[in-house]
Amino acid sequence: MANMFLLPYGQDPANLRDLNQPLIDHSEGQLFLNEAFKIIMEEVLCKGTDAKQKVCEWKEPEELALLLDLELRATGEPQQRLLQRVKDVAKYSIKTCHPHFFNQQFAGLDYHALAGRFLTEALNTNLFTYEVAPVFILMETEVLRGLRQLVGWTEGDGIFCPGGSASNMYAMNLARYRLFPEVKSQGLWGLPRLTIFTSPESHYSVKKGAAFLGMGTDNVVLVKVDDGGHMILEDLDEKIKLAKSQGAVPFFVSCTSGTTVQGAFDPLDRIAGVCEKHKLWMHVDAAWGGSVLFSKQHRHLMKGVDRADSVSWNPHKMLMAGLQCSALLLRDTTNLLKKCHSANATYLFQQDKFYDVNLDVGDKSVQCSRKVDCLKLWLMWKAVGSIGLAERVDKAFILVRYLVEQMKKREGFLLLREPEFVNVCFWFIPPSMRGKEENADYQERLAKVAPVIKERMMKQGTMMVGYQPLGNKVNFFRMVVFSPLVCQKDMDFFLDEIEKLGNDL
Amino acid sequence: MANMFLLPYGQDPANLRDLNQPLIDHSEGQLFLNEAFKIIMEEVLCKGTDAKQKVCEWKEPEELALLLDLELRATGEPQQRLLQRVKDVAKYSIKTCHPHFFNQQFAGLDYHALAGRFLTEALNTNLFTYEVAPVFILMETEVLRGLRQLVGWTEGDGIFCPGGSASNMYAMNLARYRLFPEVKSQGLWGLPRLTIFTSPESHYSVKKGAAFLGMGTDNVVLVKVDDGGHMILEDLDEKIKLAKSQGAVPFFVSCTSGTTVQGAFDPLDRIAGVCEKHKLWMHVDAAWGGSVLFSKQHRHLMKGVDRADSVSWNPHKMLMAGLQCSALLLRDTTNLLKKCHSANATYLFQQDKFYDVNLDVGDKSVQCSRKVDCLKLWLMWKAVGSIGLAERVDKAFILVRYLVEQMKKREGFLLLREPEFVNVCFWFIPPSMRGKEENADYQERLAKVAPVIKERMMKQGTMMVGYQPLGNKVNFFRMVVFSPLVCQKDMDFFLDEIEKLGNDL
């Protein structure tokens, strides 16, 4: 043990033939894990959450590859070098828990959830049968029940999927199976052309899903939206009728609660009326916005969600459960999920087990190996309660209001529109461009502002925020504010920094 | 801080309006995480790997639900109670790292991989762009390159997927896209009926995938196997011809390297000939068996794999990288993966970035949020080298040979056949049944032996091993031996224990 930090591991050929010796030494391994944990605590959780430290340590890919020495070799390395590698990976990775990381919807950090994630990893449980996952089979059921209750359903079904795109695909597959159960055995060939309806501001996974499931992106009909990004009812109704008149079979409407860019909430209650009229499966992609259901004050944004057939909701976004944590919730009580997906493999789902085999929910999934994604959310929920989670949602809205007020007090910040959610979309107009909106090259110049500011902030490492065009609107920033680690001074910092980085443009 | 372990967290409404205060206290959170880490170390990694402790603490579901107090409530809980919850989850979960867990292919534990998993969780990186995942974009490329090299490809493509089923589905989708690129936009309706060929002993994900992708389980043609579970070439060739004669378009053969139950390796080199002749996509589902490629001595089992178009390989199985770690490897050099799956979302994959946007590989996936699954494998590989990983594979084969020899020396252990891999399939014949093979109820009685022994071992918590029927063979045990934590005495224990649990039957 004395020199374990110098010797490469596992290079003793005598070990191989000696059947009395396992190939892994527990005390050595645990010592390593302890040291690695300390590094994680220091480099990621302490430095990474410190506003005075950098969000990112930008390196060009070629340089970074050299620094990391990624090559995989024949022989192992000494423990001390491996610990340095842990440190390097931490150093050059983006600190998504940093208070100035506003780039995407996985910012922030929750320590209880993280403890649940470490425990999940250590237990290495495969969530398919009660036999191997007794705790998590019961826990997943309870967490899904809790989420369904917020949707407004006292019964139903559900499953955790590897991300919101997968959840959306599950919903599509269930919808077509409910309408045409023979699709499972015969495929789409005998069926009429099926069409899906969604808004152009919905997540791209609707199109990816249509392609993956064999229905094709052309069969995703885009319904017009208003300026705020909300699906227009009349257009939905008309396009459904048009599709029918062309011989297609409309079967699925994917509404969005919290669109990716603008954070818009489709009018669920009214869409439900259209879906009921035409007997279509109503799906709500609430991957991003679903968490408003915790808030008494803001849950009205999803009024009517209880009339949907399915809801995707990613607690790894606004609730900070950690990647990946995506629930598909179903109103169905006819065991559709299992009927649609099951393969009844006898090696795994034996029917002559000594316990109730209905607990073996793995066959509801199209995965076989399935990670445990419920523990982190459960532990966090236990820690702060529904009230604590609601507070986080409410506080995010309050912070956004503060940010927007400050923007209005400053010159050069132009909102796309008043935020409906916690996405704040805005252009920064550098002083040299102010008042020159009529110039012919104004939009072209404006489009170049955000990318330059983004490059500068990345290279200085001070913060991260995303930008994109949308329809005929040129590049603008999309700030997302939801991490309970941020506060007023981070909002002020954000605005100061944008000015600092963009004032000379 | 003094009473943090008594007060429920986040219940102070004053916090909500005070924009100067973040809602999470770092020192409190880090203290909790430290304590949780100690519990994980003690309860999971120390006790859980101790042969003298139980593998499982069996409870009936109703009792377990009470013990765990799963309900999610409005208010949070004190830290001390939450730590007790961490302990309880650990206590009642199956110890998959225990030396007597032989139930499935995710047994064992690697400390370096686990350190990588903790780091992955702490960093909470979404693997889609170089911007947010600089380290992991480069690392995934390198790990995929390393795996491809073992397959025998100096170039190609690949991606980590959420499990082997997803990897197999990706392969199917790519194969049909290569043949009919219009499927992405138009769906399957305009295409002839597509058929898939695989063996009845292949993994059930081939059928699940065919259903999910809209092709239907009826279009999965099962090719006959010999007694050992290997696909019979002549039958494959005939069935392809038959499908063609019926107007279908064969496009995909899914071979298996390491079948789930018997551990059989399909004869890849010869199947490649058939695929080339008929111009079909050859996929190798090596989720379980792929790791033999590390071993000079055993890689011959996959001879011809370099002639395949795609390979699924789960390092979370035999290499113990931890759930989930599943690679899809491709021989393709035409960027098929991106062409087939991309949606070109402008909010994420902006084309006016300041770095080479070819690094933004996220659009190759049908997921949007995608977990980092490469770090754990990379760190473990760095730690023990390819030689160390090869040793683990070799040692597993040696241990299996030892186990089989011991079985032959004892009465009552009847092998289905000599193991080809590290799956040992056998019946235990209790003394009362020995020599009575001719009795009319023999098979019926034998079928009941494994379930009873299984129930007893679970309830006593001494070990775990799976059983299943296969074709006309009644319930038999399938032992899998591959964890580097086990050694000879665990094999002896296993045999003693089966006898102890089953001798009175």
Image (cartoon, coloured by chain):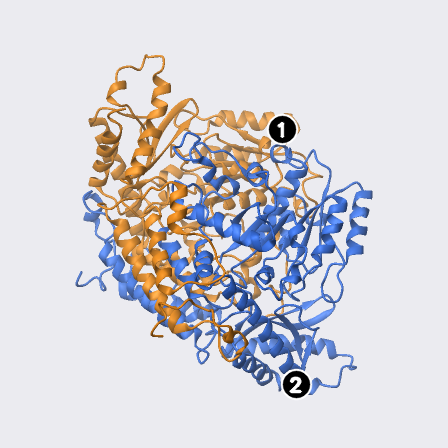
Chain colours: A orange, B blue
Q: Is residue A505 above or below residue B416?
A: above
CA distance for labels 1 and 2: 71 Å
| Residue A244 disc label | 1
Amino acid beneath label 1? Lys
On screen, residue A47 versus residue A116, left or right, reads left
| Figure quadrant of residue B233 | bottom right
- The foreground one among A395 and A273 is A395
- The foreground one among A316 and B483 is B483
For disc 2, the neighbor class at 10 Å (few under 14, some 14 to 19, many from 20) is few
Rendered location of residue B99, percent (x, y): 49, 74
Q: Please, which chain is the residue tagged with disc 2 on?
A: B
**Tag 1 near tag 2, CB within 8 Å:** no
Question: The N terminus of chain B is located in which quarter?
Answer: bottom left
Rendered location of residue B162, percent (x, y): 51, 52
Amino acid beneath label 2? Lys
Rendered location of residue B119, percent (x, y): 37, 56
- Asked if one can make out residue A76 in the rendered structure from this viewpoint, the answer is yes
Rendered location of residue B449, percent (x, y): 65, 78
Disc 2 designates what residue? B409
For disc 1, the neighbor class at 10 Å (few under 14, some 14 to 19, many from 20) is some
On screen, residue B404 versus residue A78, left or right, reads right
Q: Depth-wise, is mark 1 or mark 2 nearer the camera? A: 2
Tag 1 secondary structure = helix
